[in-house]
Image (spheres, grey):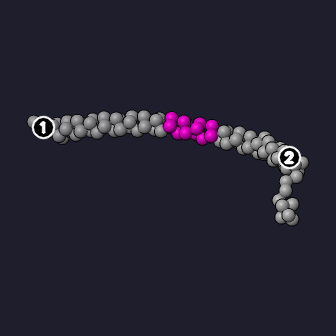
Amino acid sequence: MESQQLVTIIPWTFIAQILNLFIQVYLIKRFLFKPINEVLKKRQEAADKDIQEAKKAKEAAEAVKTEYETSMSDARGEATVSSRMRRRMPTSVPRN
């Protein structure tokens, strides 16, 4: 019989503990999780903004690279034409 009294539940204590649990959950949710979620949301938005800026910078860099390659190709073509023209023209004019 004595072992049964060690395991008994006192109704008012049980109700008070359940209420205490709900109050703690509410306070933790309000004062801990909500601010942390707001900070995480701000960090996510900042990261998304940085990613978008990086994509734009990459596109701009690729455009500059394409322009550079085009101008280099044109310059090489002009240099080739110029060197061919020099080969055809005599270096000195013959005197009579």
Question: Does residue 76 appear to the left or right of 58 in the view shown?
Answer: left
Rendered location of residue 60, percent (x, y): 47, 35
Q: Secondary structure at mark 1?
A: loop
Q: Residue at x 66, y 39 (%)?
A: 41
| Mark count | 2
Disc 1 target residue = 95
Amino acid carrying mark 2 in the image: Ile
Residue 23: mark in rendering:
none
Looking at the picture, tell me which residue is in the foreground, 34 or 64.
34
- Mark 2, Cα crowd under 10 Å, few <14 / some 14-19 / many 20+, is few
Q: Residue at x 89, y 48 (%)?
A: 12
| Label 2 vs 1, first from the N-terminus | 2
Q: Residue at x 20, y 36 (%)?
A: 85
73 inside magenta stretch: no
Q: Residue furthest bottom?
A: 2
Amino acid carrying mark 1 in the image: Arg
Rendered location of residue 11, percent (x, y): 87, 49
Q: Residue at x 34, y 35 (%)?
A: 70
Q: Quadrant of residue 46?
A: top right
Q: Residue furthest front?
A: 1
Q: Nearer the viewer, mark 2 or mark 1?
A: 2
- Mark 1, Cα crowd under 10 Å, few <14 / some 14-19 / many 20+, is few
Q: Secondary structure at mark 2?
A: helix
Disc 2 target residue = 15
Span shown in magenta = 44-57
